[in-house]
Amino acid sequence: MISFIKGNIEILKENFLVIENNGIGYKINISGKLYTYLSKNRENIKLYTFMNVKEGDISLFGFLTLEELQLFEKLITVSGVGPKGAIALLNIMNPQEIISAIITSDIKTLSSGQGIGKKIAQRMVLELKDKVDIIDAINIKPETVEDIEENDTTKETLEALLALGFTRQEILKVINGIEDKNIPVEKMISLCLRKMNK
């Protein structure tokens, strides 16, 4: 079992990459979100990996964080959710959003992943609701905030609102609409909640 690989990226495509380690090139399947991140960071990369073994094929799937890998491993235990379906979910949502959707039985959000229909999303909630916890969502480090003015207030606000179940897109849109981003965290969270609940 290959737990992780460190090295430099030799080939980078939207759905896979080849990373070189000790003269060996490893082909690893990745999400579109990870592709976007790695397009700016190609050297000395560490990816946590999952080895998928099936008849006639052995493939690797790569993740930037251990928490994302662990969530992927939980997702593929659900009947009907293969590695490609789990990657499709991670392509449009971060781990906090997926965990929050499972906990709140948000079937609409879960079925937005390519290849994830309503029945599979319902099965996902049924089988994983007792295996994930809101604490998981809070403890998972949020992705680096690159598309807003980054400071302690915006990062903590993003983390808190993700844990409450709001999507990253919703949160960033509201934060970008707040002129003073150096206000206390509590005040920014309050402002964001008022705007999103209108």
Image (cartoon, rainbow, N blue to C red):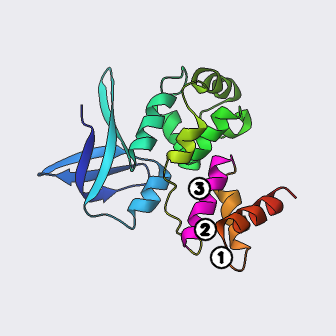
Q: Which mark is residue 181?
A: 1
Q: Position of residue 129 (x, y in %)?
A: 61, 26
Dot 2 or dot 3, earlier in sequence = 2
Dot 1 or dot 3, earlier in sequence = 3
Q: Residue at x 63, y 77 (%)?
A: 182
Q: In the image, is 12 to the left or to the right of 84?
A: left
Q: Which residue is mark 2?
A: 154
- Disc 2 is placed on an element classified as helix
| C-alpha span from label 1 to label 3 | 15 Å
Q: Main secondary structure of the magenta part?
A: helix
Looking at the picture, tell me which residue is in the foreground, 5 or 17: 5
Cβ atoms under marks 1 and 3 closer than 8 Å: no
- Disc 1 is placed on an element classified as loop
Q: Which mark is residue 159?
A: 3
Looking at the picture, tell me which residue is in the foreground, 160 or 104: 160
Q: Magenta stretch containing residue 61, yes or no?
A: no
Q: Magenta segment range?
A: 150-165
